[in-house]
Image (spheres, rainbow, N blue to C red):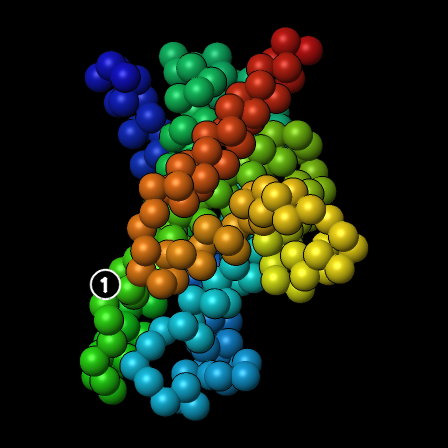
Amino acid sequence: MNQSSLGNITTLAKRELKGYFASPVAYVFIVIFLLLVGFFTFMLGNAPFFKLGQASLDSFFKWHPWVFLFLVPAIGMRVWSEERRLGTIELLLTMPITAWQAIVGKFLASWAFLLLTLICTFPIIMTVNYLGKPDNGVIFGAYVGSFLMAGSYLAISCMTSAITRNQVISFILSCVICFLLILCGYPPVTEFLTTLGVSQSLIETIASLSFMTHFDAFQKGILDFRDLVFFFSVIGFSLFTTGVILRSHRAG
């Protein structure tokens, strides 16, 4: 990547990130995310934070796949759908910037926004450290996994956003895809497949495509190379597909 390409990506990413905070959208998203994860962590489930009886954020991170399932597509659905609806996508792609630079720039801006949202949960880390002596290495690993999972959801949302100019359709499509990629590794699903007589090797293959399978390792503080490859592969494939879709629209 040459300096010119990096400069174009950085400039576009900064512009897009500033755009989030130019409207109430960013603040509403952050508040909703914090309220939801706070409620789920401290009030909901079989083992909420205060009933868990130990300095751990297991009850915090276990809800992230489900909270992201709806909130991340809400951010990603407008990335390209809005450009197509307003007719500004043609203008963007005729500027001295390539399609892949625009794709990467927009994605990084939205991903950086999600990172800021995760950083806003730091009071929970302070709380658990005040109440006990947690394994902060495990917490750090879980945050890394959460960030990568959010990026994967976002990349899929960018892909569906490029398909249609209707944000609602983009939102629904991304939710469905992400939900299936959660469900295929969910224990009740794998157990159900076992009862149907599906071979163990096939079940393991299906489960390996699940966000849950790879996020679980991060929740245990394990930074496995295979899990990193999985999340970056999802991101790379989704962004590549976004480029193919945008080029087909441009050619048409």
In the image, residue 64 lies at what x, y percent? 48, 62
Place residue 230 in its image quadrant: top left
Height in image: 123 above or below 186? below
**Extreme-right residue of the structure:** 196
**SS at badge 1:** helix
Q: Is residue 124 left or right of residue 205?
A: left
Q: Is residue 201 left or right of residue 239?
A: right
Answer whether residue 187 is visible to the viewer in this image.
yes
In the image, residue 231 lies at what x, y percent? 44, 41
Q: Disc 1 residue type?
A: Gly
Question: 226 or 71, which lies in front?
Answer: 226
In the image, residue 12 lies at what x, y percent? 36, 29
Q: Is residue 15 left or right of residue 69?
A: left
User: Which residue appears at 61% of the width and 36% of the height?
Assistant: 161
Answer whether residue 83 is visible to the viewer in this image.
no
Q: How many marks?
A: 1
Q: Mark 1 highlights which residue?
A: 137
